[in-house]
Image (cartoon, grey):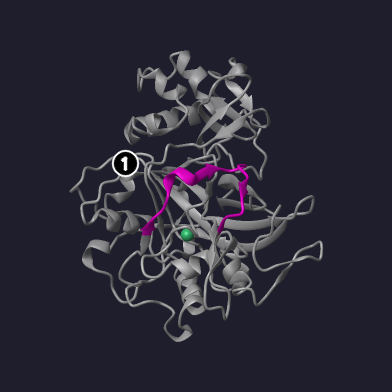
Amino acid sequence: MSNLTSWVPVASDSDFSIYNLPYGIFSAHGNGPRVGVAIGDQIVDLAALADTGFFDLWTTQRDVFHQSTLNAFIGLGKAITSAIRLALQEMLCDADTTLKDHAGLLVAQADANMHMPVSVGDYTDFYSSIEHATNVGMMFRDPANALLPNWRHIPVGYHGRASSIAVSGTPFHRPKGQVMPKDATAPVFQPSGRLDFELEMAFVVGKDTQIGDTLTTANAEDYIFGLALFNDWSARDIQKWEYVPLGPFLGKNFFSSVSPWIVPLEAFDDFRVPGPAQEPAVLPYLQYEGDRNIDIKLDVIITPEGGEENVVSRSNFQYMYWNMAQQLTHHTINGCNIQIGDMMASGTISGKDESSYGSMLEIAWAGSKPVTLSDGSTRVFIKDHDTVTMRGYAEKDGKRVGFGEVSNKVLPAR
Ligand code: MN
């Protein structure tokens, strides 16, 4: 695959090149939600294309393209969805005229509403950036022993709330809850004063397992359909008071957000990089071969109401200590089942210094180092009416594969 170009115009800085072809659920022009593939600033209407019989060679289940989630399409299995992807890529290439004559199959992204791409049965959030875990440990616990003893042995995670994950563009209200004010002796109930984002990547499970099944690091990626940007919105004051001893609860479950386009895992084949050395050596079931990290540049932007964009972090998915194959293997090693549509988030992705930290908690170091925005205002956490936007893409040798964005506005507590 080299130097492919499409007859659909694709700007050089577009995330949606012919090497990408991410899947999403969209509606436009009075039609109901359906499966689409993004290219340039357009969407290929796969439901309309299916109705022409185009996909009959691979599946006669035309209805999977007319669903309001990708679950049924993903359920066709990678053998079929990857073949469909290659056929679409070929059809969108310059030389091919199959689709050119069916202009109605293209919908401008500007004319479309994007919907939650998958029905998420279960959501798990990991904690797999060593820089993030160290920073949080220093602030929440003991700076001398920031990393707990289990951290280098286990891809630490927790089960989150699937039903409060919403698609980019969905606004939400600042959560309220119990917090323990500094130097107080009793908690108070109030709107969170420490609302934060967490820059994460999520992967969507592409294949079921049964209770009792276990995966290996060698086959775990066969169970990953694709990736999305993920913001694990967090209320730090609620979290700090409630998290002992069972971990995240109301400080996390009020809202999470995900980008609308799911990029198939194979679109990142050319962007693989080695992960960091793991010391001490992990247990045999977590050992792996090959390059399992991915070089994906990630930005976090704060936009005050009516104001300009302010980039507050530039990080990279390749910083992850634990990779997705290890996370999924660990998740199933006790016999826990996984299902198509399950969402697994990476944990906050922080780099080595504050320019690449993945949360305001770290960037402003628990409120002690305010960030000044271009309008002169300062932030230590996220204010009402702020919009937080995350963007991400991989780029190499003129090929760009990205996600677009996950962007959500914070409304006042109600
Ligand atoms: Mn998180």
Q: Residue furthest top?
A: 52
Q: Where is residue 131 in the image (x, y as percent from the top left)?
A: 48, 72
Horizontal side, residue 264 vs residue 110: left or right: left
Horizontal side, residue 384 vs residue 176: left or right: right
Q: Residue furthest left?
A: 212
Residue at (67%, 39%) from the top-left corner? 11
Q: What stretch is highlighted in magenta?
A: 158-176
Q: Where is residue 116 in the image (x, y as percent from the top left)?
A: 51, 37
Q: Position of residue 35 (x, y in %)?
A: 49, 28
Q: Is residue 81 above or below residue 52?
A: below
Q: Where is residue 161 in the image (x, y as percent from the top left)?
A: 42, 49
Which amino acid type is shown beneath numbered disc 1?
Answer: Gln
Q: Is residue 214 magenta?
A: no
Q: Does the magenta stretch include residue 175?
A: yes
Disc 1: which residue: 339
Compare residues 396 and 231 and report the one nearer the observer.
231
Quadrant in the picture for residue 198: bottom right
Residue at (62%, 42%) from the top-left corner? 169
Mark 1 residue CB less than 8 A from any atom of ligand 1: no
Q: Is residue 398 above or below residue 101?
A: below
Residue at (50%, 60%) from the top-left corner? 251
Q: In this view, does 264 lie above or below 142?
A: above
Residue 184 visible in the shown view: yes
